[in-house]
Amino acid sequence: VREPDGFTVWPGPPYPPGSSPPQRLPKTACSATSFSRDGSRLLATVASASATVYDCSSLSVIRSFDLPGLTAAALSPTGSYLQTFQKSSSPQVKNVTVWHVDTATALYQHYQKNLSKANWPMVQFSADESVACRMATNEMQFFDTNDFTKGIVYKVRLPGIAAMQLASAPGSHVAGFVPEAKGVPASVQIFSCDKDAQNQVVARRSFFRCSTVQFHWNKGSTGLLIVSQADVDKTNQSYYGETKLHYLTTDRAFEGIVPLKKEGPVHDVQWSSSGSEFAVVYGFMPAKATIFNKKCNPLHELGEGPYNTIRWNPKGRFIVIAGFGNLPGDMAFWDYSEKKLIQKAKAEWSVISEWSPDGRHFMTATTAPRLQIDNRIKIFDHTGSLQFIKEFEKLYQVDWKPESPERFGDIAELTISLNGIKIEETKKQGSRQGSKSAQTSGKAPVNVATKPAGAYRPPQSKHTAALQDKLFGGLAPTGGEMSKTALRNKKRREKQKEKKAGEGSSADDS
């Protein structure tokens, strides 16, 4: 959790209500923080000054680097390597460095003129750090991760390359993007990372009206989703340009556009943790959400709504579709295994949203500088119930520490039918324990339709009147009350008795 005066580390939820979570690390000044992909190490940087690497288990400092002019820094997936970008006054000064963290040794250096999100980090690693490569002019260059001092060991030639993405789990393939030029369509090409087959194109997709792309590899590195974006929408339907979703497989089983059922932009796309399905939010508002298998066949529809974000639970069972940014913050929590909507919730003005690694908690955050007021963290459970909220005067960053989902067990079955099991159990407890049980059971009001007045009640349910009054918020009739019809009949009978009594007295007088 990073604020203007520094960052700290919290233990995971649940947190005690009404109090701040304890701090595992005293607040430390920094300008940026990030975890390694496996969650073993934490990087904290001070702009133009230093980078410090922490061990996440003990939160002790492993190594600190003094780096004048530091602009950006990034850890490799397991935290073995640190790469840094420093301001450089001339091409003769190599300003990008790959460091070995444990020994603080500079293993590789080169000069890079500009820094952007598209080309940072410069060196990309596979999840196990067995493959490392970088993009250069008209080619992709590969390193020997056992010995970076060898420099570039082999290259893949791709004229005009503007972006690349290495598959991470495993690092078996790499994708390169070449934008359109002089009437030649843009293209994405997939190559094998095997040195012996490095220049053979495994799969290829060409398309017009494309200036930038986003790559999404699945687990297993067998499928690649490509969101292509054009700055101008020639149909004049969208101010933000035109987007398309393409899909390529390394076995060439599918090469084409994902068949979306609604026109409009592709807002978000995410693979499941297994890599066998992917979910897409797309179309003009109200947007549509659909789940596809890896053969690009639709499996399930998640409905329509003001949505532009999708987050798939790391365990693969639960899905959140939400509308953040300039949308009002509606969220829908789905149980994908049961194919049903669990609950809807709201998290207005959210900038960040992510599942916890164990899949039990969903975090949203409103952060600066996107929003300068109402900065806060909200944590929901996997069913969409709000568990924790904390306000900040200013909040810059909040991240879960990554962990392998396999470390955690499956979530127990916690969602039960309120109309069935829960109410029946409550009634049984009421018949056994009397009014004490009724008061305990009545703490959580349940929105269930009440029985009509005059419905039969068995003798053993003598305490259910008080229980229903608690459960249904006083909507159910109690035993001492009469319905309108019964009250009307009672008054009619009383009048008839009075009339007969009057007639009897007059007869006696005569």
Image (cartoon, rainbow, N blue to C red):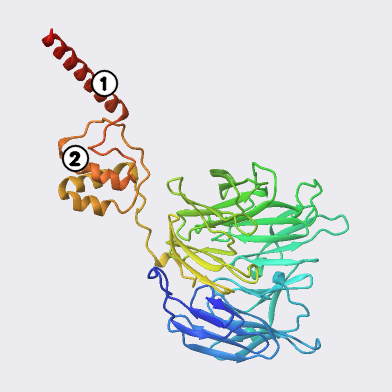
Residue 449 position in % (x across, y down): 36, 38
Q: Is residue 281 above or below residue 131?
A: above
Q: Is residue 452 above or below residue 127?
A: above
Residue 380 position in % (x across, y down): 45, 60
Q: Can you see residue 379?
A: yes
Residue 103 position in % (x across, y down): 55, 91
Compare residues 269 and 404 and report the one nearer the observer: 269
- Residue pushed farthest left? 508
Residue 76's quadrant in the figure? Answer: bottom right
How many numbered markers are drawn? 2
Quarter of the image that includes the C terminus: top left
Residue 179 position in % (x across, y down): 79, 61
Compare residues 266 and 390 and report the one nearer the observer: 390
Q: In the image, what residue occupies the spot 29% across and 44% down?
A: 469
Instruction: Return the mark for residue 492.
Output: 1
Q: Which residue is mark 2?
A: 461
Task: Residue type at mark 2: give it.
Answer: Ser
Task: Residue type at mark 1: give it.
Answer: Arg
Mark 1 residue crowding within 10 angstroms, few (<14) / some (14–19) / many (20+)? few
Q: In the image, what residue occupies the spot 23% across and 37% down?
A: 480
Q: In the image, what residue occupies the spot 80% across and 47% down?
A: 236
Compare residues 453 and 105 and report the one nearer the observer: 453
Q: Secondary structure under badge 2?
A: helix
